[in-house]
């Protein structure tokens, strides 16, 4: 399901947020927070719900949420009416304040963006089949 608001298209199937058919360099946490806010536009989303969306199964300080929301607000910029896309709901959480449109289909411009190469960054670790063998940084002589 694609969600359009202002010049933005949020398309989880294609990997995130687009503005004028170009990918917006949002963080992974920012994308998860935006997805949670766009589920119920205009309604307050509790801080705990947003934290579960961005940091599933992890306990984090509430300040992390504030930092990510601030970064997302900066990335989105101001709404057409001069307000913010994401509004703070005191003592509750946040709500998405923009008007959204949801669609199921893709248009030709979406196909052009989908043709762009994607890069995945994966964690790296050394796996040894030799039990008891431990690898450390630097050179070791025996």
Image (cartoon, grey):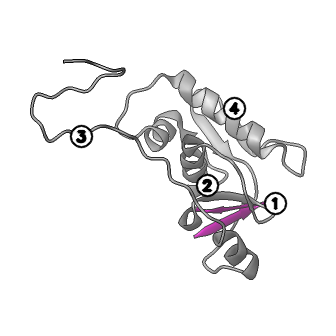
Give the distance between the C-alpha atoms of the residues marked 1 and 3, in whole angstroms. Answer: 45 Å
Q: Are marks 4 and 3 in contact (CB under 8 Å)?
A: no
Quarter of the image where one finds residue 60 = top left
Q: Name the image quarter holding the N terminus.
A: bottom right
Label 2, residues with CA under 10 Å away: few <14, some 14-19, many ≥20: many
Q: Which residue is mark 2?
A: 38
Q: Which residues make up the magenta segment? A: 1-11
Label 4, residues with CA under 10 Å away: few <14, some 14-19, many ≥20: some
Q: Are marks 2 and 3 in contact (CB under 8 Å)?
A: no
Q: Which residue is mark 1?
A: 7
Give the distance between the C-alpha atoms of the residues marked 1 and 2, in whole angstroms. Answer: 15 Å
Give the distance between the C-alpha atoms of the residues marked 4 and 3, in whole angstroms. Answer: 39 Å
Q: Which residue is mark 4?
A: 70
Q: Mark 2 vs mark 3: which is more N-terminal?
A: 2
Give the distance between the C-alpha atoms of the residues marked 4 and 1, in whole angstroms. Answer: 19 Å
Q: Residue 100 at x, y = what percent?
A: 72, 62
Residue 100 seen in render: no
Closer to the camera, 99 or 75? Answer: 75
Closer to the camera, 66 or 112? Answer: 112
Q: Which residue is mark 3?
A: 127
């Amino acid at each position: 399901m694609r969600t359009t608001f202002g010049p933005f298209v949020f398309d989880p199937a294609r990997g995130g947020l687009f503005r004028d058919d170009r990918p917006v360099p949002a963080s992974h946490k920012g994308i998860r927070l935006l997805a949670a806010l766009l589920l119920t536009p205009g309604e307050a989303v509790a801080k705990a719900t947003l934290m579960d969306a961005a940091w599933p199964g992890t306990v984090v300080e509430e300040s992390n949420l504030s930092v990510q929301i601030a970064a997302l607000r900066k990335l989105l910029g101001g709404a057409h009416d001069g307000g913010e896309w994401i509004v703070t709901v005191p003592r509750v959480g946040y709500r998405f304040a923009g008007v959204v449109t949801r669609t199921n289909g893709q248009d030709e411009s979406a196909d052009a963006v989908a043709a762009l190469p994607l890069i995945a960054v994966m964690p790296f670790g050394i796996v040894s089949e030799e039990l008891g063998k431990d690898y450390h940084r630097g050179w070791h002589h025996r």
